[in-house]
């Protein structure tokens, strides 16, 4: 979330950042809202000050036995008290209007982010691994899974509808093995603390990481209640997490950390839930784009001075997963027209899928600066004892487990329809070296 004082002091830079995102200037309209808020605050403060002054004058008038003046002042105080609710309402409405406008503005990209309109303008910065040369035509993951009778979209559709899957046997175990491998790597070698967070969160948590209000239609909401209409208790409303970024980042909401505690690094393997409201017709078959999927998330909380270096480090941790799995991938810097709402800079890792013959996203690692911290009121106290500052937040997939499963199936498929288990995963598979068709 943006700071209106910063925008007033840096209007040109703010509007230029919007231009780089292919958005229109906005500072002037924000100033109008801020002026209305200031006028409302000033009117309320003036009324409060006059009430306090008049109350003191009443006592003075009574001591001087000036009954007429005392009564006039009492009438003035009564009128001021009568006006307070309206003045307070105007102040609340003006402040809310400005806050709403600020909450819907995307983060400003860093200067080093390349300008562009969409994914076609992203910049490749690394190409790792050599795609395997097959002596047969490689299949897509859903054909492999269904051929093994271990991936069942038909049953999932009966249970839940489109964009769900039932994995069985060796493929179900492979998915679990991938998640355990990633968590062991990030906690054992990369220094992340594993967290088992709630998967149901409240509005404030979703607002803190910027899923609300702008992306409301992309989320799943649930209501807890008796369901019989007889409960006297109000229903509790929650959101299913679209990513563990939400609970992990909000662990520091409304807190003041000591600089010595930073950086904090968290990881979690959780199911994630997305409505995919804007994905009609895209990846309708298979596991690429589902309503429910498993992902290992990485989150870092740092000082402003640490955040750029931490971004490179986090991305490297995600890359290590793909390297150990021996999956070819490329790293791209997202352009200003393709980066996320809360991001200042994002690297995407795209894994090679031979069945599709293209690279597909498997991880996004983003630095958000203090954008989320302002929404969460997350601060730290510098070692020198100066005034508190907002922390910087970063998040990334380390990596998307469902898509890693897709990549393993496609890259390790064999001509007979079986799938070779990557060497690094075999200890998690009880030594199994190959997944064959279910009998």
Image (cartoon, rainbow, N blue to C red):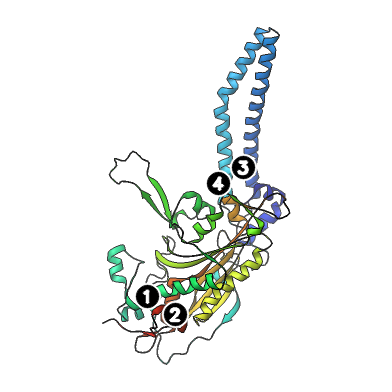
Circle 2 Cα neighbour tier, 10 Å, few/some/many (<14 / 14–19 / ≥20): some
Foreground tag (4 vs 2): 2
Marks 3 & 4, CB-CB < 8 Å contact: no
Classify mark 2: helix, strand or loop: helix
Q: Is residue 356 above or below residue 202?
A: below
Q: State the residue position of label 2.
A: 425
The CA distance from mark 2 to mark 1 is: 10 Å
Q: Tag 2 or tag 4, which sits nearer the N-term? A: 4
Q: Tag 4 or tag 3, which sits nearer the N-term? A: 3
Classify mark 4: helix, strand or loop: helix
The CA distance from mark 4 to mark 1 is: 45 Å
Q: State the residue position of label 4.
A: 100
Q: Is residue 131 above or below residue 100?
A: below
Classify mark 3: helix, strand or loop: helix
Q: State the residue position of label 3.
A: 33
Q: Is residue 333 visible?
A: no
Foreground tag (3 vs 2): 2
Circle 4 Cα neighbour tier, 10 Å, few/some/many (<14 / 14–19 / ≥20): few
Q: Which residue is at the front of the view, 300 or 74?
A: 300
Q: Tag 2 or tag 3, which sits nearer the N-term? A: 3
Circle 3 Cα neighbour tier, 10 Å, few/some/many (<14 / 14–19 / ≥20): some
Q: Where's residue 80, x and y in %?
A: 60, 22
Q: Tag 1 or tag 4, which sits nearer the N-term? A: 4
The CA distance from mark 3 to mark 2 is: 56 Å
């Amino acid at each position: 979330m943006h700071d209106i004082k910063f925008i007033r002091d840096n209007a040109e830079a703010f509007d230029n950042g919007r231009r780089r995102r292919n958005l229109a200037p906005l500072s002037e309209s924000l100033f109008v809202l801020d002026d209305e808020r200031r006028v409302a605050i000033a009117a309320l403060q003036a009324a409060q000050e006059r009430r306090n002054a008049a109350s003191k004058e009443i006592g003075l008038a009574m001591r001087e036995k000036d009954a007429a003046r005392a009564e006039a002042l009492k009438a003035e105080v009564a009128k001021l008290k009568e006006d307070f609710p309206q003045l307070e309402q105007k102040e609340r409405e003006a402040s809310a209007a400005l806050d709403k406008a600020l909450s819907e503005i995307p983060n400003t990209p860093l200067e080093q982010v390349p300008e562009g309109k969409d994914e076609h303008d992203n910049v490749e910065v690394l190409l790792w691994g050599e795609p395997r040369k097959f002596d047969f035509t490689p299949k897509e993951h859903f054909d492999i899974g269904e051929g093994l009778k271990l991936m069942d979209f038909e049953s999932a559709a009966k249970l839940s509808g489109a964009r769900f899957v039932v994995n069985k046997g060796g493929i179900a175990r492979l998915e679990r093995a991938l998640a355990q491998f990633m968590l062991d790597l990030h906690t054992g070698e990369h220094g992340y603390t594993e967290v088992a967070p709630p998967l149901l969160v409240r509005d404030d948590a979703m607002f803190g990481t910027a899923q609300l209000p702008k992306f409301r239609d992309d989320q799943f909401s649930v209501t807890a209640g008796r369901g019989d209409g007889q409960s006297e208790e109000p229903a509790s409303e929650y959101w299913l997490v679209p990513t563990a970024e939400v609970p992990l980042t909000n662990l520091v909401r409304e807190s003041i950390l000591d600089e010595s505690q930073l950086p904090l690094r968290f990881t979690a393997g959780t199911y994630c839930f997305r409505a995919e409201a804007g994905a009609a017709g895209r990846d309708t078959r298979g596991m690429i784009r589902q309503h429910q999927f498993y992902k290992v998330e990485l989150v870092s909380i740092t000082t402003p001075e640490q955040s750029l270096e931490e971004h490179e480090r986090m991305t490297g941790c995600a890359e290590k997963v793909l390297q150990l799995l021996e999956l070819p991938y490329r790293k791209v810097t997202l352009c200003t027209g393709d980066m996320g709402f809360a991001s200042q800079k994002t690297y995407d890792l795209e894994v090679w899928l031979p069945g599709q013959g293209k690279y597909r996203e498997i991880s996004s690692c983003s630095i958000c600066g203090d954008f989320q911290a302002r929404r969460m009121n997350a601060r730290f106290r510098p070692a020198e004892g100066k005034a508190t500052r907002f922390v910087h937040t970063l998040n990334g997939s380390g990596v998307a487990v469902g898509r890693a499963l897709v990549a393993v199936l496609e890259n390790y498929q064999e001509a007979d329809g079986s799938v070779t288990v990557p060497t690094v995963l075999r200890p998690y598979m009880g030594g199994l070296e190959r997944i064959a068709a279910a009998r």
